[in-house]
């Protein structure tokens, strides 16, 4: 008996000793959401961390083991997935989600916020754990993901997954892996020896979020060598691949998706930041895909933040792009794949000096005639006059693609249009769509208005008018807008650059359920100012989201319009502007106004601007009060704003280009239920609230403001305006009234327009 007991004790002790001898799996914890937030916070205070939050109607399974790797130096190694799916008994496509972290850091929890949101849209999302550099080098991580795909397919029935509809996505290093997994469908070289070997590891779609498609570009190889020579330590990509290219060429080539494309490769959607190095090999991959007839998409989040998927507002757009792509791949009843009409396949040539309006228009017309499709502009510069998009068509501009506007006004015909709150005949824009529902313009290419000649003509006319003492208007010098949409519901502008417009940059009239996201909209002040080049004009629109955009034109950033004049509110041609969200945008230094209501606006309701950064010398919120128009501005919120600005709020009479039209009417304005809160930064002053004498201001609150300013004076003529926890230079502001003379002197444009020629 004693012998048996002693033997058992010895066995137990040996087990403890064996366990103690097994080292823990090494973890590099340097890459987290919060470490990234700390790095970008100074330059991007508008970013808001996306936190996990299980949506209603979504079910979760946590830490499910998908494989056990036997006898590693860390013992038997379990690898896990999390699973999120709609909380019902239906079968859905699956999306396996691979986290980033430079192949040496991060974990599957980084994917959870996106996974939860995508699951709520009808997918089974699966953040996956895989081995990283501290534990194993390439190809271990790739083999883990291939194993995870096989496990998902083998266990599809248990989790309500369609085994024939499996996609994989990744972020950064995870995106490189995801693309490699999808490109190498059927490749025995990349399969590995993991579990479920009799099950296919093929995937049907790939989403690449800011990940490279090749390691073997000259720049990648040289960069790794230079970093090693400078620091004596292998950079992370070389560590993962087992050495520099000259030491481990086979791994560098084997891990490069660009070298393994076949007709079996899966369709891919690229969602890229504004940092080109994370897109190495992307355009070459797309070109090969095009030659093989494999579908691909490219989208750009125009921000210099690599892990944009961690933050609102960019994660919202990312989820939209991802699910839209997945819908096209897996839900053809919801999203029919459009036919593509590449301009250069139909006789249009890359020539910035040759006017090709007719040739480009014929491609648009052909797309409509053949049932609709996507008009694609490849890399190059294409000179054109006004283009008219038709029902069923859309516009996509690839990286390096430029539509350049003619600088001859005769290339923009006079047509029924809308300008300055009036329905009139005016020149067409460069890009036009009339009653084209679901119309889309997507980047990352550029629409360039080529407006220099028009700007010079405008200022010359202003100078002549001022010298002769005659009045002048914005319409005397005929100038085309860049983009004009009339009555286009469910339209979307995404990831496109809009620059150098001769007049208003983008004008939307009576467009409902409109989304403008991740666009860059710019017009200069030097060497010649681009007058009245408003970035985004919403004219009688309802339910609009402006998200993640950079706006920097020589006029207003986002301007709400709808009509002007004594009887404007009685005309069917005019309309309110309602349910507007401006979220996560950056407003640049050229602007005259950040969020502006007026110059032609009869009613604005439920307008929210939040989580934005301002870097200019104008007002954050500007309400223009016309003496000739009945106006109501109500239910307006401005919150979570940082940066540098001229004033927080400006409410003044707007007397430019107005007339009572011989009427005895005495229009008045009403401003009610306005809240400005949680604003920090530097400014000239808090601002001025001094509308027309008979205008009414009620329920107006300014709270939780902490700004540095040149003056502590706040000009306000309304005792109903309430200040709560407002600090200017660390103390409460001095509240003083503004008389009529002072109102005129404070009005930004009243002074600015008289000095236009001097600002050229």
Image: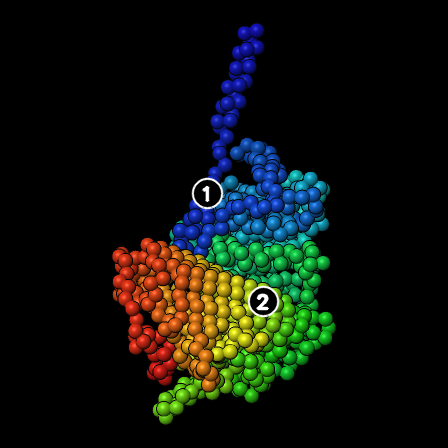
Q: Quadrant of residue 154?
A: top right
Quarter of the figure with the C terminus: bottom left
Residue 520 shows up from this direction: no
Residue 140, image x, y percentages? 57, 44
Task: Name which residue lies at 49% across and 69% down.
Answer: 603
Left or right: 717 with respect to 340?
Answer: left
Q: Which residue is mark 2?
A: 512
Of all residues shown, which one is farthest toward the bottom?
Answer: 468
Q: Secondary structure at mark 2?
A: strand
Of all residues shown, which one is farthest toward the right?
Answer: 370
207 versus 26 height, above or below: below
477 versus 641 height, above or below: below
Residue 174, image x, y percentages? 55, 50
Residue 533, image x, y percentages? 46, 76
Task: Name which residue lies at 48% across and 38% down.
Answer: 26
139 versus 488 height, above or below: above
Residue 560, image x, y percentages? 48, 70
Left or right: 208 with respect to 265?
Answer: left
Residue 120 shows up from this direction: yes
Q: Which residue is mark 1?
A: 28
Tell me which label, 1 or 2, sits earlier in the chain.
1
């Amino acid at each position: 008996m004693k012998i048996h007991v002693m033997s058992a004790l010895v066995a137990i002790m040996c087990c403890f000793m064996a366990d103690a001898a097994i080292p823990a799996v090494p973890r590099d914890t340097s890459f987290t959401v919060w470490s990234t937030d700390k790095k970008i916070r100074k330059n991007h205070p508008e970013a808001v961390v996306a936190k996990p939050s299980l949506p209603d109607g979504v079910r979760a399974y946590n830490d499910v083991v998908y494989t056990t790797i036997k006898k590693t130096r860390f013992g038997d190694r379990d690898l896990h997935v999390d699973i999120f799916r709609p909380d019902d008994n239906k079968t859905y496509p699956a999306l396996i989600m691979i986290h980033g972290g430079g192949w040496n850091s991060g974990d599957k929890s980084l994917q959870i916020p996106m996974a939860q949101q995508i699951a709520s849209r009808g997918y089974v999302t699966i953040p996956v754990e895989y081995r990283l550099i501290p534990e194993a080098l390439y190809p271990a991580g790739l083999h883990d993901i291939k194993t995870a795909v096989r496990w998902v397919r083998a266990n599809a029935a248990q989790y309500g997954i369609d085994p024939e509809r499996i996609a994989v996505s990744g972020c950064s290093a995870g995106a490189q892996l995801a693309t490699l997994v999808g490109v190498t469908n059927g490749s025995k070289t990349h399969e590995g020896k993991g579990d479920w070997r009799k099950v296919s590891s093929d995937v049907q779609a790939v989403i690449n979020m800011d990940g490279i498609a090749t390691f073997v570009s000259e720049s990648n190889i040289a960069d790794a060598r230079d970093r090693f020579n400078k620091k004596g330590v292998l950079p992370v990509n070389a560590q993962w691949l087992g050495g520099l290219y000259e030491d481990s060429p086979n791994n560098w080539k084997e891990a490069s998706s660009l070298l393994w494309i076949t007709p079996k490769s899966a369709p891919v959607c690229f969602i890229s930041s504004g940092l080109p190095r994370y897109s190495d090999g992307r355009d070459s991959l797309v070109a090969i895909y095009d030659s093989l007839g494999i579908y691909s998409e490219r989208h750009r989040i125009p921000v210099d933040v690599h892990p944009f998927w961690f933050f609102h507002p960019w994660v919202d757009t990312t989820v939209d792009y991802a699910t839209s792509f997945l819908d096209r791949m897996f839900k053809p009843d919801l999203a029919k794949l459009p036919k593509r009409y590449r301009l250069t396949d139909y006789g249009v040539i890359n020539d910035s000096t040759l006017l090709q309006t007719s040739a480009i228009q014929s491609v648009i017309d052909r797309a409509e005639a053949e049932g609709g499709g996507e008009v694609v502009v490849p890399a190059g510069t294409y000179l054109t006059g006004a283009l008219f998009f038709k029902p069923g068509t859309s516009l996509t501009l690839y990286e390096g693609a430029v539509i350049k506007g003619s600088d001859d006004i005769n290339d923009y015909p006079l047509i029924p249009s809308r300008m300055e709150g009036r329905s009139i005949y005016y020149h067409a824009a460069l890009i036009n769509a009339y009653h084209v529902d679901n119309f889309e313009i997507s980047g990352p290419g550029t629409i360039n208005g080529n407006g220099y000649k028009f700007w010079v003509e405008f200022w010359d006319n202003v100078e002549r008018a001022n010298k002769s003492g005659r009045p002048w208007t914005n319409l005397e010098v005929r100038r085309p807008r860049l983009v004009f949409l009339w009555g286009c519901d469910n339209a979307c502008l995404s990831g496109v650059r809009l620059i150098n417009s001769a007049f208003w940059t983008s004008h939307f009239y009576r467009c409902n359920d409109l989304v403008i996201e991740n666009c860059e909209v710019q017009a200069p002040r030097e060497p010649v100012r681009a007058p009245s080049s408003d970035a985004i004009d919403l004219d009688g629109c309802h339910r609009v989201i402006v998200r993640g955009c950079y706006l920097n034109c020589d006029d207003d950033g986002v301007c709400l319009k709808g009509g002007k004049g004594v009887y404007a509110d009685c005309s069917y041609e005019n309309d309110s502007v309602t349910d507007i969200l401006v979220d996560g945008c950056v407003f640049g230094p050229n602007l005259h106004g950040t969020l502006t209501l007026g110059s032609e606006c009869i009613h604005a309701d439920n307008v929210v601007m939040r989580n934005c950064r301002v870097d200019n010398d104008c007002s954050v919120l500007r309400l223009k009060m016309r003496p000739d128009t009945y106006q109501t501005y109500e239910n307006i919120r401005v919150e979570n704003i940082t940066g540098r600005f001229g004033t927080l709020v400006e409410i003044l009479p707007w007397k430019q280009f107005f007339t009572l039209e011989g009427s005895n009417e005495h229009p008045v304005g009403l401003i009610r239920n306005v809240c400005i809160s949680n604003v920090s930064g530097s400014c000239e002053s808090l601002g001025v609230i001094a509308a027309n004498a008979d205008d009414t201001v009620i329920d107006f609150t300014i709270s939780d403001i902490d700004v540095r300013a040149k003056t502590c004076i706040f000009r306000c003529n309304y005792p109903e305006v309430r200040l709560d926890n407002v600090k200017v230079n660390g103390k409460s502001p001095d509240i003083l009234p503004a008389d009529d003379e002072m109102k005129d002197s404070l009005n930004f444009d009243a002074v600015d327009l008289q000095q236009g020629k001097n600002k050229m």
